[in-house]
Image: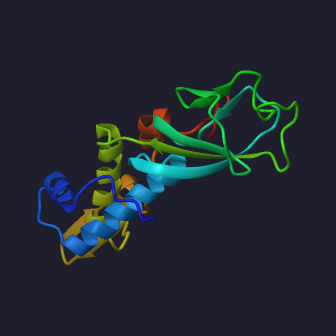
Amino acid sequence: MALPPFATAADLAAVMQTPVDAAAADLALASASAVIRRWTRQTITRVVDDVVQLRVIDCDALVLPQRPVESVSQVMVNALALTDWVLSGDRLLRTGGWHRLPGTTTYPDPGLVQVTYTHGWDEIPDDVRGVCLDLASATLSNPAMLRQESIDDYSRTFAAESLGLGGLSDTHKELLGDYRRRVGTARLR
């Protein structure tokens, strides 16, 4: 499923304060959004009824990978719908943990739980949109990724941040840090 970019061509034109080619803007915004999604490990955009398979290893909670979690519509194990769970933030909890099926003391092999849930933001957060626009405008401002260009007595030098490489700066990473998926209590770098 193709996810929409975090900003529009009109947003990009407003930030750049100049008209932009719609096709180039759409490509730059899609690329910038993909860079952000890859680094955060999050779709960020609202996804309804997403299906994920989670492996159970004797645990008290199953952590759903995408945030924020709005709702869970179904939890299945081997075609058996489970109803004895509760959603707490981005975690699914069960009395007695996830190591057993109802009425048993063990979990069936292969220990996979299929969860259907809705996650993400209806409106893209401003800081995410800002980073997307920053990356896309850098790409469009300097599509040839020149460090410097000169014509006769005119010379123009681009800052390293405007080379249009599509990479996140340390400032970008700081702005996006709260959206990055974590494992346990440790933040992945």
Answer with left or right where residue 79 lies relative to residue 24. right
Task: Give the quadrant of residue 189.
Answer: top right
Which residue is at the front of the view, 133 or 112?
Answer: 112
Q: Residue at x 47, y 41 (%)?
A: 173
Task: Give the quadrant of residue 136.
Answer: bottom left
Q: Is residue 131 above or below residue 165?
A: above
Answer with left or right where residue 167 lies relative to residue 127. right
In the current view of this chain or complex, which residue is farthest to the bottom? 152
Which residue is at the front of the view, 105 or 167?
Answer: 105
Task: Give the quadrant of residue 102.
Answer: top right
Which residue is at the front of the view, 98 or 147?
Answer: 98
Q: Is residue 181 above or below residue 112?
A: above
Q: Residue at x 32, y 52 (%)?
A: 6
Q: Residue at x 29, y 71 (%)?
A: 149
Which residue is at the front of the view, 11 or 109?
Answer: 109
Answer with left or right where residue 26 lies relative to residue 101. left
